[in-house]
């Protein structure tokens, strides 16, 4: 058994930015997916569920960050679930059992993941520089079936919570708040609904309001690399919004797991599309954490501005800092390193935090591959921020704006509240 351990709470991954999302043909997609399924199936046959359970428990006992919690919570669970695993007959049954067991630890960054879980691909891509992770994927290339949405299940209904900018879902007309009734006549699943229909148009049946009828929307799934997809979506999210006579810049950082994501932001405000806006909104909702607290230096005012002139007396200004009003948008999905940014922004008055309390998911995560090809993501380090524990606590916003995403028809009350706040702040400042 090979183990992989990397702390990703303050992750800075050195990987080159790929400016265009790569697509593959339907034939290549099927070959890729068939190979991935075959690899996982082959490994499944090599170990019994009883043996896999022992392997799983050893990893938790040896590496979970709190030996006290292991002794008090996990060991009793181990005895209980050792009996239940004897009745497991399927991979999905084993996965459900392990995740139910891990819930007993009441800690974030702790999941049993299979190729049926989106996080399996997200995390594998973050750790893609490690050879043992690459071996889990055909040719070492990490791709997953996607249309560019995130969803959550509420009252047994699947709702779209986020539509990535520039994604096939956005182009097709799917909206935040849509209830997914079915996909190709079957119940929606984030992976299984898409994996057999790569580069084919499929029908999503959605309900846009609680009282209206259903509508059918055709969208095409593709196989994409998560890192490339998130970089492209971040670039496409950059927008200048006119509000009450003010120019408000907006950017959505879906993943912050690497310096390359922060560079898109800094480039946009230093010399790009957001350079001349009056204020800035940075959306930290949904997706992946991983941000370094050093990213708050973007708002450091104690950095000099530069002005240079050429022999024709032309002036060139360079100011890498953001010195105008800024908002961080947060909600219950804002997690890990993103929460540390929200904490620092609020604590040192670098930015105004607007929205809902963050997830309270701030520990050091580690990724392990098991003998059957599945993954164990485990909290392996406790983390304190300026001596405070945010795990299980989260960060309260400066201005609380709650939002029920269900049937919101693409509207975003938290974003609208941030726009109003910044516009009023700018107007008040100019009137002084």
Image (cartoon, rainbow, N blue to C red):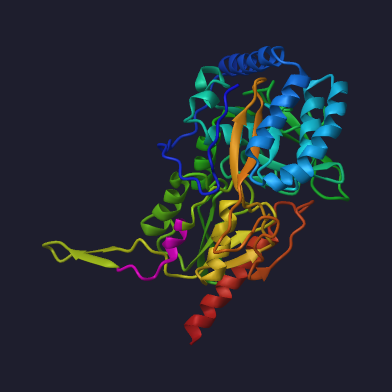
The answer to whether 105 appears left or right of 421 in the picture is right
User: Does the rendering let one see residue 169?
Assistant: no
Q: Between 62 and 368, which is closer to the camera in this rendering?
A: 62
Which residues lie in the magenta part? 294-304
Q: Locate residue 411 relative to residue 239 in the image: left or right.
A: right
Q: Pinpoint residue 249: horizontal percent, then vertical percent.
A: 50, 61
Magenta stretch contains residue 252: no
Taking depth in this image into account, of 368 and 415 the one nearest to the observer is 368
> Number of numbered discs present?
0
Q: Quadrant of residue 320?
A: bottom left
Asked if residue 22 can be seen in this view, the reply is: yes
Residue 356's place in the image compared with 25, above or below, is below
**Residue at the (47%, 44%) spot, across then down:** 258
Side of 93 relative to 39 (left or right):
right
Residue extending farthest left: 311
The percent position of residue 60, horizontal first and vertical second, equals 68, 36
Q: Which residue is located at x 54 percent, y 31 percent?
A: 225
Q: Which quadrant would residue 221 be assigned to in this image?
A: top right
Q: Percent from the top left, x then y, of residue 257?
A: 52, 44
Residue 424 sits above or below residue 168 on the image: below
Vertical arrangement, residue 34 with respect to residue 387, above or below:
above
Quadrant location of the N terminus in the rendered image: top right
Picture coordinates of residue 170, whole percent (x, y): 63, 42
| Residue 262 vertical position relative to residue 190 in the rendered view, above or below | below
């Amino acid at each position: 058994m090979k183990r992989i351990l990397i702390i990703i709470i303050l992750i800075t991954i050195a990987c080159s930015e790929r400016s265009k999302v790569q697509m593959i043909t339907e034939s290549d997609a099927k070959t890729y997916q068939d190979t991935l399924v075959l690899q996982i199936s082959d490994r499944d046959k090599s170990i019994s569920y009883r043996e896999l359970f022992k392997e799983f428990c050893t990893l938790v006992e040896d590496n979970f960050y709190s030996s006290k919690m292991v002794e008090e919570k996990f060991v009793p669970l181990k005895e209980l679930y050792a009996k239940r695993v004897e009745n497991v007959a399927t991979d999905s049954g084993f996965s459900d059992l392990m995740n139910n067991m891990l819930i007993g630890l009441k800690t974030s960054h702790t999941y049993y993941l299979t190729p049926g879980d989106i996080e399996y691909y997200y995390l594998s891509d973050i750790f893609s520089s490690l050879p043992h992770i690459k071996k889990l994927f055909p040719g070492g290339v990490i791709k997953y079936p996607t249309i560019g949405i995130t969803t959550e299940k509420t009252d047994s209904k699947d709702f779209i919570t986020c539509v990535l900018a520039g994604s096939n879902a956005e182009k097709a007309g799917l909206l935040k708040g849509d209830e997914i009734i079915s996909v190709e006549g079957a119940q929606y699943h984030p992976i299984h609904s898409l994996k057999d229909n790569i580069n084919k148009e499929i029908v999503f049946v959605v309900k846009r309001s609680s009282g209206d009828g259903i509508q059918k929307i055709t969208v095409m799934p593709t196989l994409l690399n998560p890192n490339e997809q998130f970089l492209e979506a971040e670039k496409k999210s950059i927008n200048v919004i006119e509000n009450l006579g003010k120019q408000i810049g907006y950017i959505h950082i879906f993943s912050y797991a690497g310096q390359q994501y922060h560079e898109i932001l800094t480039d946009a405000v230093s010399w790009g599309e957001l350079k001349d806006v009056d204020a800035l909104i940075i959306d930290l909702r949904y997706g992946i954490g991983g941000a370094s607290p050093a990213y708050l230096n973007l708002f450091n005012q104690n950095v000099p501005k530069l002005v240079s002139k050429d022999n024709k007396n032309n002036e060139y200004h360079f100011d890498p800092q953001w010195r105008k009003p800024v908002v961080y948008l947060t909600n219950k999905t804002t997690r890990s390193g993103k929460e540390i940014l929200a904490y620092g922004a609020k604590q040192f008055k670098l930015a105004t935090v607007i929205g809902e309390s963050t997830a309270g998911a701030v520990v050091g995560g580690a990724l392990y591959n098991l003998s059957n090809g599945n993954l164990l993501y485990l909290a392996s380090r406790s983390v304190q921020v300026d001596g405070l524990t945010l795990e299980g606590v989260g960060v309260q916003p400066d201005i609380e704006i709650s939002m029920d995403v269900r049937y919101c028809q693409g509207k975003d009350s938290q974003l609208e509240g941030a726009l109003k706040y910044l516009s009023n702040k700018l107007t008040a400042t100019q009137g002084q």
